[in-house]
């Protein structure tokens, strides 16, 4: 390429760069301060708004707790209000930057529709969480069986609920899985039955087995006096029968009562000379 052509091209590029720099300088001198103030204003709105949202959430929870309402309901309502305040804060902050809030609201609506179609399961979980909180088939601290698992309820969230298993594992269950199946609440009533089935040999007198099983309930600190414990014969076999000890305890003492009664029943039956079922005999002809 001729030297004159190269020089001409370089001059043109330099001119374009100078024009862009001049344009940027003009914009900064005329709009830079205004934009900086708007940015600071939007940042201040966001920071103050998030602080206010957190304050409203904690204040609402404390206020509702003082009124004696259920903590699960309190937290659920406070979380929804917290989220709504944050959305309002973000829209207001964007408005300070000159972004039309009406168009932004339409964008949010369109995005919400698209996300809703893509996340129908989460919307179902949200609706299920609402039902769990306000119809209250269980509450925090209850021991339940639901969603294919069981444990003590630790939290009922917007989309999921958290249980603690007997071995202290954290179980997170989608709310829709809970409401879509049977829910068994073992803590719903003030008393819970403990059943200890004991299969013994058919030659043992039922009265002796019954008296032996009932004798272990008086010294067990977890067994309630009312309703009174009973021992009933439930099944009959060829050389055996099953006697069930049925006692009552508080729901929170169920496992302690179950384990201690199991062990005490085994020990008491052995000491009383109660024999186990004999093995079945088969005649084989050659």
Image (spheres, rainbow, N blue to C red):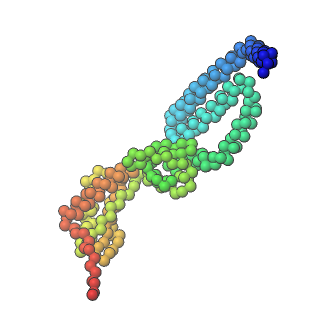
Q: Quadrant of the N terminus?
A: top right
| Image location of residue 243, percent across then percent down | 31, 67
The answer to which quarter of the image holds residue 228 is bottom left
| Image location of residue 196, percent across then percent down | 32, 61
| Image location of residue 66, percent across then percent down | 50, 34
State the count of labels.
0
Q: Is residue 6 above or below residue 112?
A: above
**Residue shown at 65% from the left, 32% from the top:** 87
- Farthest residue, direction top: 29
* Residue 210 or residue 274, whichever sits in front: 274
Q: Is residue 62 above or below residue 154?
A: above
Residue 141 seen in render: no
- Judge from the rendering whether residue 187 lies leftward or rightward of residue 199; answer left or right: right
* Residue 153 or residue 248, whichever sits in front: 153
| Image location of residue 200, percent across then percent down | 27, 69
* Residue 282 or residue 249, whichever sits in front: 282
The answer to which quarter of the image holds residue 198 is bottom left
* Residue 103 or residue 161, whichever sits in front: 103
**Residue shown at 60% from the left, 37% from the top:** 80
**Residue shown at 41% from the left, 48% from the top:** 165
**Residue shown at 55% from the left, 48% from the top:** 175
- Judge from the rendering whether residue 90 lies leftward or rightward of residue 19; answer left or right: left
Residue 284 seen in render: yes
Q: Quadrant of the C terminus?
A: bottom left
- Judge from the rendering whether residue 59 lies leftward or rightward of residue 261; answer left or right: right
- Farthest residue, direction bottom: 286
């Amino acid at each position: 390429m001729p030297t004159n052509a190269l020089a001409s091209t370089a001059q043109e590029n330099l001119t374009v760069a100078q024009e862009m720099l001049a344009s940027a300088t003009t914009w900064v001198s005329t709009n830079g301060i205004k934009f900086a103030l708007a940015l600071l204003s939007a940042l201040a709105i966001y920071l103050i708004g998030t602080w206010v949202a957190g304050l409203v959430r904690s204040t609402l929870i404390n206020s509702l707790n003082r009124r004696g309402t259920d903590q699960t309901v309190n937290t659920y309502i406070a979380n929804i209000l917290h989220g709504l305040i944050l959305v309002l804060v973000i829209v207001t902050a964007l408005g300070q930057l000159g972004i039309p809030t009406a168009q932004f609201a339409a964008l949010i609506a369109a995005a919400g529709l698209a996300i809703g179609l893509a996340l129908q399961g989460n919307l179902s979980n949200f609706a299920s969480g609402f039902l769990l909180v306000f119809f209250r088939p269980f509450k925090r601290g209850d021991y339940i069986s639901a969603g294919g698992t069981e444990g003590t309820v630790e939290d009922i969230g917007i989309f999921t609920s958290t249980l603690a298993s007997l071995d202290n594992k954290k179980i997170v269950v989608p709310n829709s899985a809970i409401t879509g199946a049977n829910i068994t609440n073992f803590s719903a009533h003030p008393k819970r039955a403990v059943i200890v089935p004991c299969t013994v040999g058919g030659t043992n007198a039922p009265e002796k087995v019954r008296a032996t099983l009932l004798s272990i309930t008086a010294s067990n600190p977890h067994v309630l006096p009312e309703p009174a414990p009973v021992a009933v014969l439930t099944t009959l076999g060829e050389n055996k029968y099953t006697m069930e000890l049925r006692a009552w305890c508080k729901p929170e003492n169920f496992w302690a009562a179950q384990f201690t009664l199991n062990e005490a029943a085994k020990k008491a039956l052995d000491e009383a000379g109660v024999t186990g079922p004999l093995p079945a005999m088969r005649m084989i002809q050659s």
